[in-house]
Image (cartoon, rainbow, N blue to C red):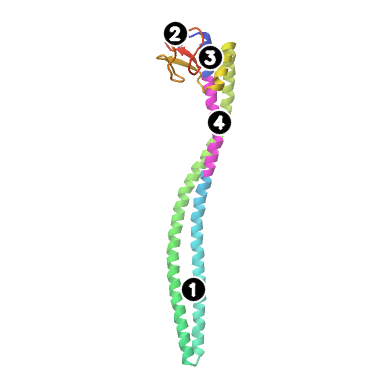
Amino acid sequence: MPDMAPEWLEKLLVLQDRDVHRLLVETQLAAIPREREAAARKIAQHKVVIEEAHGRVRELELERSRLEQEIATTEEQARKYRNQQIQVKKNDEYQALTHEIAGTEAKISDLEGKEIQTLYDLDAEREKTATEEKVQGEEITFLENQLVRLTEKDGNLKTELVRARETVEVARKEVPARSHRVYDRLAKVLALPVIVPLRGQKCSGCHLRVSAGVDAEVRGGGEMTACDNCTRILYSEA
């Protein structure tokens, strides 16, 4: 604030400072639902990763069970062929059964190889899933804690907003009626701050050079003077 500033300027700057704080609190409060939604969305994504990892384990477990069942069925078929082979008397029937037995044994060997590979894959996938679950679980815990903090922040900001609005109203009552009207009109169409210092003949709001007349009026002090570019209220810092 400039030295020996007129009373209307001092009161407007106090009002503006409190208005800026109120706006900041409102902005932070308005952002909380989006922050909650983002955290909840990330939690859901992490859970999907965990579920997909468990899904891969379940698929391998099902494949292992399928192979076990197919091996058991094929072994039973091989036993039947051997029993039949004992009973046949014709050589061609015996040879046919020998061929069938060889085929089932080859199939069993192939299935057992696949079963062993599936067991290796299953062990590896379980280990990978455990690691994935730990990593994703830590992220979920962090985000769940963030949701708790957001709930606390929401309550604190609502309380702070009540106080901020009260201080704005107190400051508003101290501002002269004419200054009050000008400030409100500017605040509706321009982003705060609407009362800014003149620096080097440039408005610090729009950063454009003002006319010599405006510069002289501002440096003269006393009267409310607007930037002839953006219409913000100017004051001299000298």
Residue lying at 46% horizontally and 75% vertically, measured from the top left:
108
Mark 2, residue position: 216
Point out the frontmost of discs 2 and 4. Answer: 2
Q: Earlier in the sequence, mark 1 or mark 4?
A: 4
Instruction: Count the marks.
Output: 4
Residue lying at 47% horizontally and 89% vertically, measured from the top left:
94
- Compared to 28, does 182 lie above or below? above
Q: Earlier in the sequence, mark 3 or mark 1?
A: 3
In the rendered structure, which amino acid carries the disc numbered 2? Ala
Point out the frontmost of discs 1 and 2. Answer: 2
Q: Which residues are magenta?
A: 17-41
Point out the frontmost of discs 3 and 1. Answer: 3
Q: Which mark is residue 29?
A: 4
- Compared to 158, does 84 lie above or below? below
User: CA–CA distance between discs 1 and 2?
Assistant: 100 Å
Mark 3, residue position: 12
| Secondary structure mostly taken by the magenta-highlighted segment of the chain | helix
Residues packed near mark 2 inside 10 Å, few (<14), some (14 to 19) or many (20 plus): few
Residue 95 placement: quadrant: bottom left
Residue 225 percent coordinates (x, y): 50, 11
Do labels 2 and 3 touch, CB within 8 Å?
no
Between residue 8 and residue 113, name the one nearer to us. 8
Between residue 205 and residue 12, name the one nearer to us. 205
Q: Which mark is residue 3?
A: none
Between residue 2 and residue 123, name the one nearer to us. 2
Q: Earlier in the sequence, mark 4 or mark 3?
A: 3
Point out the frontmost of discs 2 and 3. Answer: 2
User: CA–CA distance between discs 2 and 3?
Assistant: 21 Å
Q: Secondary structure at mark 2?
A: helix
Q: Earlier in the sequence, mark 1 or mark 2?
A: 1
Do labels 4 and 3 touch, CB within 8 Å?
no
